Image (cartoon, rainbow, N blue to C red):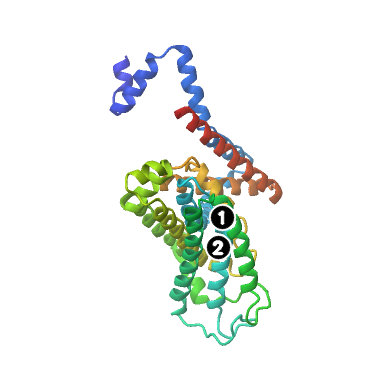
Amino acid sequence: MEEKETVGLPSRAKASLGNFKALSGRERAKVIKNGLLDNALYILIALFVIAVFAYNPSFLSADSVVNILMQSASRLIMALGVAGIIVLTGTDLSAGRCLGLCACICASLLQSSGVAGKMFPALSYSAWLIPLALLISMLVGACVGGFNGFMVSRFKLHPFIVTLGTQLILYGGVMWYVSLGQNNSAPIAGLDPGYTRLVTGGINIGGVQIPNYLWIAVLVTLIVWVIWNKTVLGKNMFAVGTNPEAAAVSGVSVAKTIISVFVLAGILYGVSAFVECARVSSNSTATGVNYELDAIAACVIGGVSFMGGVGKVRGVLLGVFLLQLVNAGLVFLNFEPAIMTVIKGAIILIACALDMRKHIAKT
């Protein structure tokens, strides 16, 4: 009977099944308990989804799922940038403000010619401004990331402190920027349709409009996967995140790696800002506020460890999707924004506590 039960299972699965059967009753209970605790967050999210679906079956309709995927795509690019920093045992509290500044820069450059309240009236819209705005956005993001990385690596400051300070600097910077020209600190709107169509326009598949920013997110995800898994920077990033002293002894430039990862994150914030600018349409000092919290929550849900050296691109993908699934579920249940924020905070705490538990169990 035992042979028949394991027919068709991979060899590793057979071995695991055999090992489990060889355990005593108490040991089996311990294994099951540990498995439930390690996956407690996923179990809770699954139960939550089932409850919302029972309350409102349209929650998991095709249109709803596609909408959740679209929301995930718009947040994924930033989350990938934050994930690299978390792999280094750091965090980035300035990510949302960096995105906000870059988005306002893109918006100011890509307003339609002659629009009422145009920030820079002398700047006529032209198609060549689109790649220029993207390049400037990425460059600004890279500079912010490079500054953060330099402060962390050169002065041995914790990323929390560095990015907290940078967050305030960037907030002041974006308030100053939106006050320039003819804008007088008003939201920057009137974006040229050529730009917004490029980002939010898309292809109709089966009656569902798939926006172009989904394909942008897919492309960026593939590039990040290659960097993480196929380049020296990716190898060094995980080595430094696991043990910076051992990495240094092995010949890895810890400072260079830290700065490079922060610069990569900044570039991703710049790309995310280019997308978000067109998606939001009206950009102001409020653009990007608390976006970093969603990114951090998505990363920890997806298994990117704050203990460093652990994280996968597919985990970030899963984390972003699950977080947006929870957000959508709370909307379907008519929760107030204040309660939704509380729940997001609880998710971060639970995910970090479970991550710490796994780390303690290994040591």
Pointer 2 residue: 98
Q: Is residue 185 visible?
A: yes
What percent of the width, then of the height, locates residue 242?
41, 41
Q: Residue at x 58, y 60 (%)?
A: 166
Q: Is 51 left or right of 156, judged from the image as shown? A: right
- Viewer-side residue, 360 vs 158: 158
Which label number is shown at residue 205? none
Q: Under tag 2, what secondary structure?
A: helix
Q: Under tag 1, what secondary structure?
A: helix
What percent of the width, then of the height, locates residue 255?
42, 53
Q: Amino acid at mark 1?
A: Val
Q: Give the vertical position of 60 relative to 95 (above or below).
A: above
What percent of the width, then of the height, locates residue 320?
51, 49
Q: Give the vertical position of 200 relative to 67 (above or below).
A: below
Mark 1 and mark 2: span between their CA atoms?
A: 14 Å
Q: Give the vertical position of 28 relative to 312 (above or below).
A: above
Q: Residues within 10 Å of mark 2 (few under 14, many from 20)?
A: many
What percent of the width, then of the height, locates residue 123?
54, 85
- Viewer-side residue, 170 vs 327: 170
Q: Earlier in the sequence, mark 1 or mark 2?
A: 2
Q: Residue at x 45, y 62 (%)?
A: 267
Q: Which residue of the protein is positioned furthest toward the bottom in this rendering?
A: 122
Image quarter where the N terminus lies is top left
Q: Amino acid at mark 2?
A: Cys
Image quarter where the C terminus lies is top left
Looking at the rendering, which quadrant does residue 94 occupy? bottom right
Pointer 1 residue: 162
